[in-house]
Amino acid sequence: MQHDQEQREGNRRLLHLDEGDHDHKRDAIALVDSTGKTVTAVARELGISSESLRGWYRQAKADRGKGAPGELTTAEREELKRLRRQNAEQANTIEVLRKAAVFFAKESDR
């Protein structure tokens, strides 16, 4: 029991886990892979949310091509986000141009 507590404390110190830090996420995922422990057990040892670690682990598997069918990689998610943002900007531009066309059409009728 004492050894388990020391191991958990050692893992926490090793990682200095900050949920926003890519290196710490990678290290936590590597602990799941290397120890054979469940995501929940590793998360408990590290003092982080098991749902956070589960999400990181699932995304890492997708990035390695081992995710569920249809699951997007990080690069695909980023591209989708960029394309949605670009689509919204273009929709706004179209709306402005449409309003300008209506305005100028009314002005030319006078």
Image: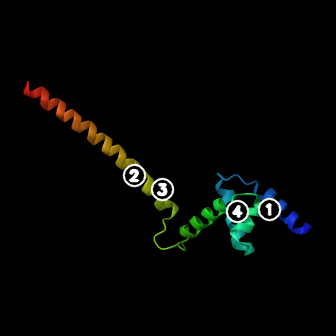
* Residue marked by disc 4: 27
Which element carries disc 3, helix, strand or loop? helix
In the picture provided, is 54 more to the left or to the right than 34? left
Q: Is the Cβ of the residue at disc 1 closer than 8 Å to that at disc 4?
A: no
Amino acid residing under circle 1: Asn
Measured Cα–Cα span from mark 1 to mark 2:
39 Å
Q: In terms of sequence position, does the residue under pointer 3 or pointer 1 come before the other?
A: 1
Q: In terms of sequence position, does the residue under pointer 1 or pointer 2 come before the other?
A: 1
* Residue marked by disc 3: 78
Amino acid residing under circle 3: Glu
Amino acid residing under circle 4: Asp
Amino acid residing under circle 2: Arg
Measured Cα–Cα span from mark 3 to mark 2:
10 Å
Measured Cα–Cα span from mark 4 to mark 3:
22 Å
In the picture provided, is 72 more to the left or to the right than 57? left
Measured Cα–Cα span from mark 3 to mark 1:
31 Å
